[in-house]
Amino acid sequence: MSIETDIKQKKFRSAYQRLALNLVYTSNWLEYKQLEIFKEYDITSQQYNVLRILRGQQSNPIKVSDITERMLDKNSNTSRLVDKLLAKNLAKRSSCANDRRAVDVLITEEGLQLLKELDPLVAEWENRFNVITSEEADQISSLLDKLRESDH
Amino acid sequence: MSIETDIKQKKFRSAYQRLALNLVYTSNWLEYKQLEIFKEYDITSQQYNVLRILRGQQSNPIKVSDITERMLDKNSNTSRLVDKLLAKNLAKRSSCANDRRAVDVLITEEGLQLLKELDPLVAEWENRFNVITSEEADQISSLLDKLRESDH
DNA sequence: GTTAAATAGATGTTACAACATTAAATGTAT
DNA sequence: ATACATTTAATGTTGTAACATCTATTTAAC
């Protein structure tokens, strides 16, 4: 369904305005879809994002501030997200040896297990993107990159 | 800056995964930029969205449920958003004649005035999208539409 | 006409986001 | 070495999002 139909708006000031609205709308749609997957496993998209980052580090611990740098939403409160993961035994925390301000975070076996369970679901979800070609996906990606470059 | 650099991730499982992450990341960026504009005027993006919808109706009142249908975020609590606008005298509410369950909402002169003030700022913000061509914008838009069609 | 179902909107509750502030440790300048 | 600034993470506060529930009204079924 076109964005015109979805938000019942026939005219847009420009192709840029339509794109801006479409981006926000599509992203909401996307996050809502993710939410549906994750809520059965009692985690949020943000928490999943942190878990993925932790797994990406292999068994190397990673500082809270480094997690933030890798987050999709840089403004999220990583400290509290880690709290949540800790409470569910999905991550563990230990103070950093060479910098006593910092805190090292590591994914637990249970966290890895949860991600393993989620992997096929997330993969299946990503496969729905096959309605566009891999080249088109790359194309949008690089246009999005270009878009954010107006930021200085 | 590429999404790879922004979230410090070198490899992606697929072009689709990169696109998914890029979409969420770009949308966060976008909403944050909007927030910066709106917060000086003490409204949220959601409230702005409602105001725009109200203005789009000209002077025809519109039901709360119809506003929701036009929202970018369909899950938002329109009732409370309208409350906020009411409290700031940016909208007014009157019970609907032919359906006493429904509530008609209308933008006030003050609301129109605020939008008028915001118009140049929003336009300027949209102009930053000129780093891509109008054709490219259309292209992304229709690919996004296509993407959401996997939803059935 | 009465009962049941559906719709519109408001409200209560819980968790989280946004933002500022704090506390401790580290870095830097003099 | 001391004073000041910076970094790192945690926490306090306020508002909002998410979700369920409630009330009033309308529509549909019998």
Image (cartoon, coloured by chain):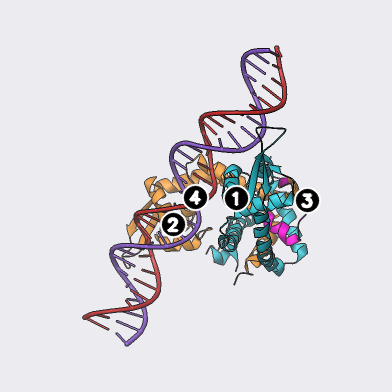
Chain colours: A cyan, B orange, C red, D purple
- Separation of marks 2 and 3 at Cα, in angstroms: 41 Å
What mark, if any, has residue A85 been given in the picture?
Answer: 1
**Are discs 1 and 2 both within one chain?**
no
- Separation of marks 1 and 4 at Cα, in angstroms: 35 Å
**Residue A98 x/y as whole percent:** 72, 33
Whether pointer 1 and pointer 4 mark residues with C-beta atoms closer than 8 Å, the reply is no
Whether pointer 2 and pointer 3 mark residues with C-beta atoms closer than 8 Å, the reply is no
Relative height, residue A79 to residue A100 (above, below):
below
Q: Secondary structure at mark 1?
A: helix
Disc 1 chain ID: A
Disc 3 chain ID: B
- Separation of marks 2 and 4 at Cα, in angstroms: 12 Å
First in sequence: mark 2 vs mark 3: 3
The mark lying in front, picked from 3 and 1, is: 1
Q: Is residue C13 left or right of residue A32?
A: left
- Which residue occupies 70% across, 69% down? A131
Asked whether D19 or A73 is in front, the reply is D19
**Residue A29 x/y as whole percent:** 58, 61
**Label 1 sits on what residue type?**
Leu
- How would you rate the neighbour count of disc 4 (Cα within 10 Å): few for under 14, some for 14-19, many for 20 or more? some
In the rendered image, which residue does mark 2 sit on?
B78
Asked whether A142 or D17 is in front, the reply is D17
Relative height, residue B132 to residue A130 (above, below):
above
In the rendered image, which residue does mark 3 sit on?
B10
**Label 2 sits on what residue type?**
Thr
**Are discs 2 and 4 both within one chain?**
yes
The mark lying in front, picked from 1 and 2, is: 1
**Residue B112 x/y as whole percent:** 44, 48
Report the span colored magenta.
B6-21
First in sequence: mark 4 vs mark 3: 3
Magenta stretch holds residue B9: yes
Asked whether A80 or C25 is in front, the reply is C25
